[in-house]
Amino acid sequence: MFAEKSTGRELVKGFGRIFGHGFAIILGMLLMITGLGMGVSMVLLPVGIPLGLAGLLVFIWGFFGWSESGPSRASLH
């Protein structure tokens, strides 16, 4: 009985993690494209550069970041 509940929770956690990372990848791409578009104009260049860099960081986190405290937390269970 406990194994079924535990398995369900793990599946929901895994799906939530995948969804969160997928959302971060898409958001990062949108921010980078928006920053690039703003960087074309000299007036919006000071806003476009930080926006594009923030998008790059979100995009990289989507691929390589952890949505929890890291692998050490998983080893405690």
Image (cartoon, grey):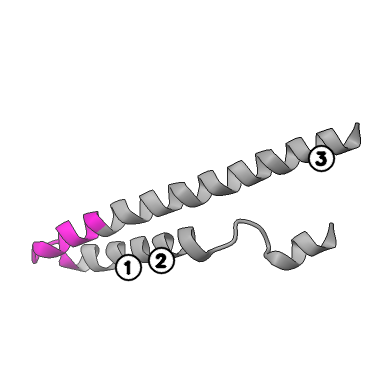
As rendered, which of 30 and 14 lies closer to the eye? 14
Real-space Cα separation, disc 2 to disc 1, in angstroms: 6 Å
Name the residue that disc number 1 marks: 53
Q: Is residue 45 left or right of residue 60?
A: left
Please name the residue shown 86% across and 38% down the image.
3
| Residues under numbered marks 2 and 1 in contact, where contact means CB atoms less than 8 Å apart | yes
- How far apart are the alpha carbons under marks 1 and 3? 39 Å
Residue at image mark 2: 57
Q: Give the percent coordinates (x, y) of residue 22.
A: 46, 48
Q: Is residue 75 rendered magenta in the image?
A: no
Magenta span: predominant SS is helix
Q: Tag 3's secondary structure?
A: helix
Q: Amino acid at mark 1?
A: Leu
**Residue 38: quadrant of the picture:** bottom left
Residue 42 percent location from the top left of the image:
8, 66
Q: CA distance from mark 3 to mark 2?
A: 33 Å
Is residue 7 placed above or below 41 in the rendered structure?
A: above
Q: Quadrant of residue 50?
A: bottom left
Tell which circle, 1 or 3, labels the residue nearer the N-terminal end.
3
Left or right of 13, for residue 50: left
| Label located before the other in sequence (3 or 2) | 3
